[in-house]
Amino acid sequence: MALIKKFRIKSYKNEENIVELKNISVFFNKRQILDNLNLKINKQEILGMLGPNGVGKSTIFNLITGLKDPNYGEIIIEGINCTKLPINERFNKFKLGLVPQYGGLIHDLTLLDNLKLVAEIHIKEKEMRTQKINKLITKFEFESLLNIKGKHLSGGQKKKLVIAMALVNDPKILLLDEPFAALDILTIKMLQETVLNLQSTEEISVVICDHQARDLLNCVDRAIILSNGKVIASGSPNEVITDTVAKNEYFGDEFNIN
């Protein structure tokens, strides 16, 4: 098999916040998941979140989308406190897109019908719906897959479809939950390139949560490491893997991204 070239994108230029979690604490049945957490996500940044199971990565996604309310703290999106804003208003007002770890498509519908279904929800004008669907078909090279049902697509094809469905509403912020899980090397590389392309051509802020640390670190501008409900390290991929606390709490001494 040919060597998969590792790539690193240039540092993001815009350091203006698009999302801020301020002094967030979350409890589940008296167990504290997040402990006075503070996190800022910059516009057009690809941010990666790493940490052990149960550390609160998916909870952060749920807080941003409104699926979970914090016990304490505030959620600021584009300078507006939306802590109490309902899910549907939050998705529409702030143009959020979510790619879940599992599901996200209807398996008995064809690839094209899945795109049409989402487009009908978000785009009223028929001509604009058609234009958007055609643009996504070209962008993701779906031409040969249009009439294949979701259940017959490969893992990578399903993931690309769910990402495309999340882009129908032209999101400003795209949340990817475990996008590299259970995929082969070539498919992971394809998804990494897809994410980079979204940043450069669509100017989307992307947040990735994944347990595949190397795959995540090879396509993000900045990474945070979560442990015991807090951010224990934040910086470029090279900075976080050499951080002493991050090594002790998560990576260990032998980890590298080469």
Image (cartoon, rainbow, N blue to C red):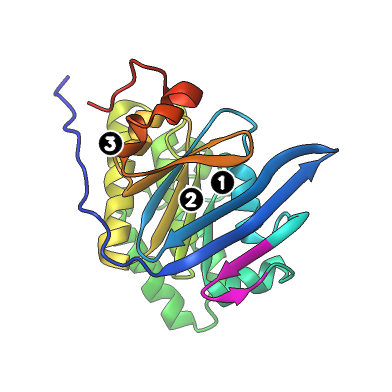
Residue at the far front: name it: 244
Q: Residue at x 52, y 77 (%)?
A: 123
Measured as percent of width and height from the top left, residue 190 is found at 28, 41
Q: Is residue 227 above or below residue 164?
A: above
Q: Residue at x 17, y 19 (%)?
A: 1
Instruction: Please provide the residue range marked out in magenta.
Output: 74-82
Element type at marker 3? Answer: helix
Q: Quadrant of residue 90?
A: bottom right
Q: Which residue is mark 3?
A: 238
Work out how far the residue at label 2 is from the one at label 1, CA to CA, in angstroms: 8 Å
Amino acid residing under circle 2: Val
Q: Is residue 75 above or below residue 239?
A: below
Q: Which residue is mark 2?
A: 162
Residue at the far top: name it: 254
Q: Residue at x 73, y 69 (%)?
A: 86
- Does 78 appear in magenta? yes
Q: How many marks?
A: 3
Mark 2–mark 1 contact, CB under 8 Å?
yes
Amino acid residing under circle 1: Pro
Sequence-earlier tag: 2 or 3: 2
Tag shown at residue 100: 1
Measured as percent of width and height from the top left, residue 148 is found at 44, 45
Mark 1–mark 3 contact, CB under 8 Å?
no
How crowded pointer 3 is (Cα within 10 Å; few <14, some 14-19, many 20+) is rated as: few
How crowded pointer 2 is (Cα within 10 Å; few <14, some 14-19, many 20+) is rated as: many
Task: Decide which of 56, 115 is in the foreground and name it.
Answer: 56
Q: Nearer the viewer, mark 2 or mark 1?
A: 1
